[in-house]
Image (spheres, helix red, strand yellow):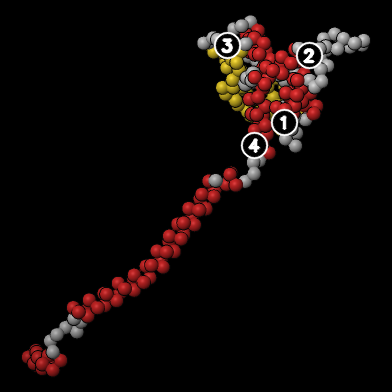
Amino acid sequence: MKNSNEQLKMAMDEIIGIEPLVREEDKTKFLMKVHKKQKTYLVPKLLTALLFIGLAGWLLFLALNSGGLQQASPADKNIKTIETVLNQMLTGPSKELSKAVDAWENAVPDTGEGVNSGIITSTPDPLRQYTDKYFKPYFTEEGLTDYINTSGLTFLMQADWYGYVLKVNDLKIEKLEMEGNYYDFTVTVSFQKTGSDQQNTAKVTGQININDEGKIQVFSMFGDGGLLEKMTEGR
């Protein structure tokens, strides 16, 4: 039986041939076609992936910079207002302020009947002009009047009189968790007498209330860390 099978195989080989059904050149052609198709499909897939990565990057950029595209919140505006006022209140005195103080001191007082001696009635009032220019935009009318009558230009005028220079070194503002826009502030102020190498610091603290229009309506001082007293005594 075995010999018969071998004879049959030999007879078929003579007719068909003994060359493999799948030749090496056939394998090569097949692989080349497959590789070509992979390239064809790879290009659009790669472009899709790049577009996806680019879109994801753009969305991330927008997320990180969305604060710059949106308008500042009311709380941010309020803090900016407080920072501006405190910096103007505790930095200087500038030449403009010194000039206003000189004009105010040299103004002729009204000594007419029914008027207390020493009251300045010069028109326009140089100090009021100064406060209107630098502080009025941030206060309500009543709030500005109270501010001038309490804190106002006290620190800058004192510094001008006693020859000191004030500078804000650090400023901290904290919004209180209560109804209304109330903010506590702490300002570290450096003060140095003109011509002296010694520089000292003091902490000025207080609270500010801002209305819904973003204007300061109440400005309350808690303490000045002895700043006015030290300037008066020349320390």
The residue that label 4 is drawn on is 76
The residue that label 1 is drawn on is 138
> What amino acid type should be assigned to the residue bearing mark 2?
Ala
> What amino acid type should be assigned to the residue bearing mark 1?
Tyr
2 or 3: tag closer to the N-terminus? 2
1 or 4: tag closer to the N-terminus? 4
In the image, residue 41 lies at what x, y percent? 38, 70
Quadrant where the N terminus is found in the figure: bottom left
The residue that label 2 is drawn on is 107
Judging depth in this view, the residue of 39 and 34 nearest the camera is: 39
Near mark 3 (Cα within 10 A), the count class, few <14, some 14-19 or many ≥20, is few
Q: CA distance from mark 3 to mark 4?
A: 36 Å
Mark on residue 209? none
**Residue lying at 54% horizontally and 48% vertically, measured from the top left:** 63
3 or 4: tag closer to the N-terminus? 4
Near mark 4 (Cα within 10 A), the count class, few <14, some 14-19 or many ≥20, is few
